[in-house]
Image: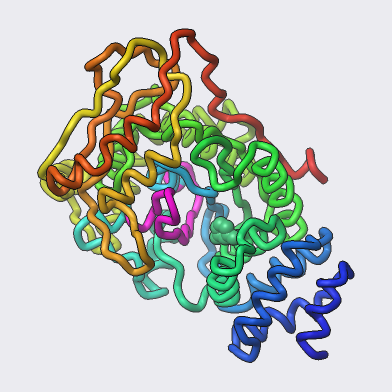
Amino acid sequence: MLIQEIIRRKRDGQTLSRKMLDLITQGITDGSIGDAQIGAFAMAVYLNGMDRDESVALTESIRDSGQVMHWHDLELPGPVLDKHSTGGVGDLVSLVLGPWVAACGGHVPMVSGRGLGHTGGTLDKLESIPGYDIAPCDATFRRLVKEVGVAIIGQTGSLAPADKRLYGVRDVTATVESIPLIVASILGKKLACGLDTLVMDVKVGSGAFMPTPAASRELAEAIVAIGGDAGTRTSVLLTDMNQPLADCAGNALEVHAALRVLRGEDTSSRLYAVTQSLAAEMLVQAGLAGDDADARRLLDRALNSGEALERFSRMVHGLGGPADLADRACHHLAEAPVSLDIEADCTGVISAIDTRELGMGVVELGGGRRNPGDAIDPAVGLSRIAALGERVEPGQPLLRLHARDRADAEAVTSRLRRAFSVSETPTDTPPLVHATLRPEATA
Ligand code: URA
């Protein structure tokens, strides 16, 4: 069948068969379809959507467009499971959650991404650790997943290659914001990792990838349904991104924050609470815990015994990083030469934070990329970020910024100050977990 005939069907609002979608993804992968046809296909889907069967077929087709990992030959003693997030600011959950779940008996083959737009990327954070190799050979990756229980690496060229090209075309054809295309893109990559269970963290709020809470919810419902239909038990936590999750943002700063949680020094933050909720959901869904309370008990034990930190250290060392990172983090992680407090200029309560702006501030400081392929500065970023609901006085710091030089610091100061709204009357702070969606609820 001609590709243009398949595009015409979608353009005219008809449904596409699995065979048609396989032809499209095959052509995207082997290069026989040009960017013009990929763009037209993406726009037809953007405008007319997809029904559930089409969405499942596209997801599976993207998953199968390259290497699909299998774990049964390793005879792992526990389930293979992972978490994925739609991305946020100060969202370093993966760094803590992977080793924490491994310490509870899970095996976590986590394939992560780089920063995108205002959101930070797990790989960029890990690369602030000297020597950490995000592209190990397959044998090393599999050995770590088996022996340590976790390995966090970057996407290889052979994993869901159709997504890489399709995403690139979507990015320049105004077709990123399509639920079936987003679902197929996210799940196609994740399900290629051979997971038994996936928990997704879909963010809601001023720093979220989806523009409105309703759109976040729509994406979450689609992910639960399509993930399950494609054979991987999938649940979603809708979590708050109306302020940075950690009180810092920036690559090395976030590795320090991860270590504080893993050492058991930070058990009262939003970061801790969201990570624990996601990890508990993973343990329950994968059958490692009977219920949420049981899962939280297991997690407490893994943290208090030092086992979660131990798994993190073994992963880092196994991937080329220093063996003593946990003990000598300040020695190994870069520190920015200039730090500057941004102060409040009025009295009141922090009533809103433009989280996206804070993320863009980190990018502007050099902690993210302006263009694909740019080098990033691991040392720069923000710390001590004040929280929603906090009372401030003139002169009191809203955050501390860490920059390469004074000029860089001054260039972002007003942008960062503007990100905070201060009002006279206290406002409600949003819940950390807005909702949990499980297969039963949406089937
Ligand atoms: N993240 C992805 O991997 N794909 C999308 O389409 C959107 C976000």
Q: Residue at position x 44%, y 14% from top?
A: 423
- Where residue 98 appears, as percent x and y from the top left, is 43, 48
On the rendered structure, is 10 left or right of 74? Answer: right
Residue 226, x across and y down, in percent: 74, 56
Q: Where is residue 409 shown, x and y percent of the image?
A: 20, 41
Name the quadrant of the N terminus.
Answer: bottom right
Q: Where residue 339 appears, x then y in whole percent?
A: 15, 36
Give whichever of 257, 39 is nearer the camera: 39
Q: Is residue 150 magenta?
A: no
Task: Identify the residue at horizontal 54%, vertical 15% (top origin).
Answer: 428
Tell me: residue 430, above or below residue 101.
above
For the point 66% across and 35% down, which residue is it? 436
Give above or below for 273 relative to 394: below
**Magenta region, mostly helix, strand or loop?**
loop
User: Magenta segment range?
Assistant: 102-124
Q: Nearer the viewer, residue 296 or 321?
A: 321
Question: Would residue 114 be counted in the magenta stretch?
Answer: yes
